[in-house]
Image (cartoon, rainbow, N blue to C red):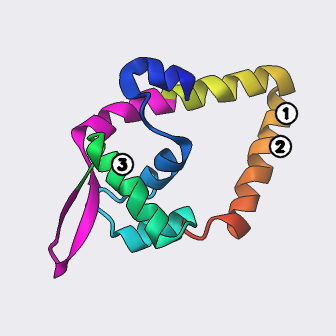
Amino acid sequence: MRRWGRQGFDDVTIAQSRLMMGIDPEGTRVSVLADRAQVAKQTATALVDKLERAGYVERVPDPTDGRARLVRLTTRAEAAIPHARAEEDRIEAEWEAHLGPRRMRQLRDALTALRDITDPYQ
């Protein structure tokens, strides 16, 4: 997160970034984001409030339900995605340099298999 912060995105916490990963392109309800991030709805609401104040998300009307609102990424959040992906690549390269290609493949395979029991929203 430190390198990502140097790109001008230093105001996002790990919890906030985890919540943002669950936002669909067309937007997502806070209750769905809470489920995806495995946090209470009140926690998700507080995280969305902070992300909205920082300019990463916006709340828009849900076209399927006039009473509901969707959380959608803003252009600022979309601008952060390439920097986050670059940081992921840097970390993976560091791990592979330490583990070697074969063990890195094994780690990736093991982590992918664990998603079956840890991530119902894959």
Name the residue at 36% across, 48% down.
50
Q: Where residue 27 sits: x, y (%)?
A: 28, 61
State whether residue 29 is above or below residue 76: below
Q: Secondary structure at mark 1?
A: helix
Residue 52 x %, y %? 28, 49
* Disc 3 packing (10 Å; few <14; some 14–19; many ≥20): some
- Residue kind at label 3, given as amino acid type: Lys
Q: Residue 102's mark?
A: 1
Label 1 crowd bin: few (<14), some (14–19), many (20+), radius 10 Å: few
State the separation of the CA atoms marked 3 and 2: 38 Å
In whole angstroms, how far apart are the C-alphas of marks 3 and 1? 41 Å
Under circle 2, the secondary element is helix
Which one is nearer the viewer's eye here, 13 or 110?
A: 13
Amino acid at the residue labelled 1: Arg
In magenta segment, residue 30: no
- Are dots 3 and 2 in contact, CB under 8 Å? no
Q: Amino acid at mark 2?
A: Gln
Quick check: is 75 in the magenta stretch? yes
Residue annotated with mark 2 = 106
Q: Hey, which quadrant is residue 89 in on the image?
A: top right
* Earlier-in-chain disc, 3 versus 1: 3
**Camera-nearest label, 3 or 2:** 3
* Point 48% across, 63% down: residue: 43
The residue that appears at 42% across and 51% down in the rendered structure is 20
Q: CA distance from mark 1 to mark 2?
A: 6 Å
The residue at which mark 3 appears reads as 50
Q: Magenta residues?
A: 59-85
**Which image quadrant: the N terminus?**
top right
